[in-house]
């Protein structure tokens, strides 16, 4: 019995409360939720700017999808068709740019709208790819029950270039900072994990 208590006590973070691996999983889960929220907000800005128009019903059953589910569906469609859209809109932008003095003001405006739309696609794709990476990272962090320090868990599970890049992104993302996604203690854990 004493051995079991000793092992359990050894898995707590340094304040003696929550196990360190749970602290890490919570940090990564908060990051995932915020990144998905940022992707949806990017989509909403594109809708407001009328660069994306959503028409029709996704499902015609009594249980209609929520607005958030519908937007996640659209984000998924953007992810699926990102390369095709880059090619299509990229070709259009190039064709407008090569017109020279025959270019019209409406073509310049359309090309600029296409350029902004492509930037939004890139942002959505980056945010969603990062959020997907966090799923596997949460799983890996949950396996580190033997480590006492949450920053050590983040550090030991962020050995790939992709995770190091993601950790840097979490440390420098202005929206995460502005939205106060992480507490001071959580920010310190992320900082201590390095990158």
Image (cartoon, rainbow, N blue to C red):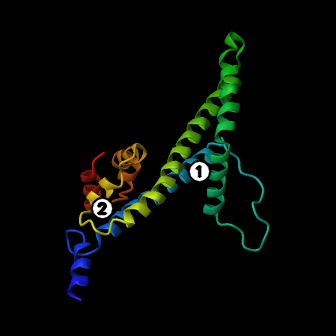
Which residue is identified by label 2? Answer: 183
Q: Quadrant of the C terminus?
A: top left
Task: Please say if 162 is above or below 135.
Answer: above
Side (left or right) of 168 relative to 96? left
Q: Quadrant of residue 105?
A: top right
Whether 31 is drawn above or below 64: the answer is above
* Disc on the earlier residue, 1 or 2: 1
Q: What residue appears at the point 26 percent right and 83 percent down from the top-left corner? A: 4
Residue 37 left/right relative to 161: right
Rounded to the nearest angstrom, the CA distance separating label 1 from label 2 is 27 Å
User: Residue 18: x and y, percent?
Assistant: 29, 74
* Residue at image coords 78%, 56%: 56
Toward the viewer: 190 or 42?
A: 190
In the rendered image, the quadrant that contains the N terminus is bottom left
Identify the residue position indicated by label 1 in the image: 44
The answer to whether 78 appears left or right of 36 in the picture is right
The dot on residue 169 is: none
Q: Residues within 10 Å of mark 2 (few under 14, many from 20)?
A: few
Disc 1 secondary structure class: helix
Task: State the residue in front, 19 or 106.
Answer: 19
Which type of secondary structure does the marked residue at label 2 adopt?
loop
State the residue in front, 89 or 6: 6
**Residue at left 60%, top 31%?**
115
């Amino acid at each position: 019995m004493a051995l079991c208590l000793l092992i359990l006590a050894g898995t707590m973070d340094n304040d003696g409360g929550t196990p360190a691996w749970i602290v890490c999983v919570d940090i990564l889960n908060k990051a995932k939720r915020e990144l998905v929220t940022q992707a949806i907000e990017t989509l909403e800005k594109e809708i407001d700017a009328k660069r994306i128009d959503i028409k029709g019903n996704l499902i015609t059953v009594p249980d209609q999808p929520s607005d958030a589910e519908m937007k996640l569906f659209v984000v998924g469609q953007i992810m699926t068709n990102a390369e095709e859209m880059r090619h299509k809109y990229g070709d259009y932008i190039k064709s407008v740019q090569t017109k020279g003095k025959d270019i019209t003001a409406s073509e310049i405006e359309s090309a600029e709208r296409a350029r902004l739309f492509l930037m939004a696609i890139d942002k959505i794709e980056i945010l969603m790819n990062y959020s997907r990476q966090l799923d596997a990272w949460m799983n890996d962090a949950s396996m580190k029950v033997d480590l006492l320090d949450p920053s050590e868990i983040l550090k030991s599970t962020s050995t790939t270039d992709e995770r190091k890049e993601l950790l840097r992104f979490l440390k420098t993302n202005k929206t995460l900072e502005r939205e106060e996604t992480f507490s001071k203690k959580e920010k310190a854990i992320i900082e201590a994990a390095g990158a």
